[in-house]
Amino acid sequence: MSLIGHNSDNKKPKLIIDITDIYDQRARKKKELDFYTKELEKLMTKLGMIQQEIGVTETVIRLIENEQILDLQEAIRQKRRLEED
C-alpha cells in the first residue's frame, strides 16, 4: 500500500511505494497474461477450424458451379455399358 509522507526540504508530499504492492501487481498481471494467452490459443484453434471449413465449402461451391461433381451412380452405369459393348 502507498503511504504519503513529506520531505523536509520540500513542502510537497512525497509518495512512498511499498515494494510488495509492486510484486503483487506483477503477479496479478502475469496471471492475467497467462489467462488471456490460453484464451487466445483456444480462439486461434477455433479460427483455424472455421477457416478450413470455409475452404472446403468454397471448394464444393466451385465444383458445383463448374459442374465438376461426378454423379457416381451414372458414371458406374456408363462404365458398365462401355464394358458390355
Image (tube, helix red, strand yellow):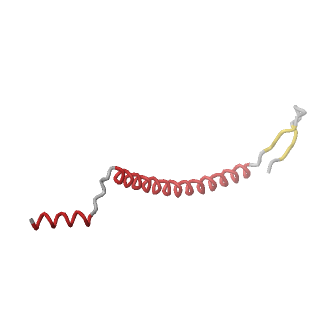
* Near-viewer residue (80 or 45): 80
Left or right, 56 with reference to 23: left
- Give x and y (percent) for residue 55: 41, 52
Left or right, 15 with reference to 50: right
Question: At 13% across and 63% down in the image, what residue appears?
Answer: 82
- Give x and y (percent) for residue 22: 71, 49
* Near-viewer residue (32 or 7): 32
Left or right, 52 with reference to 28: left
Question: At 52% across and 58% down in the image, what residue appears?
Answer: 42
Question: At 81% across and 48% down in the image, what residue appears?
Answer: 2
The quadrant in which the C terminus is found is bottom left
Quadrant in the rendering for residue 8? top right
- Seen in the picture, residue 46 relative to 18 is either above or below; the reply is below
- Give x and y (percent) for residue 32: 64, 54
- Seen in the picture, residue 10 relative to 23 is either above or below; the reply is above
* Near-viewer residue (56 or 31): 56
Quadrant in the rendering for residue 38? bottom right
Quadrant in the rendering for residue 34? bottom right
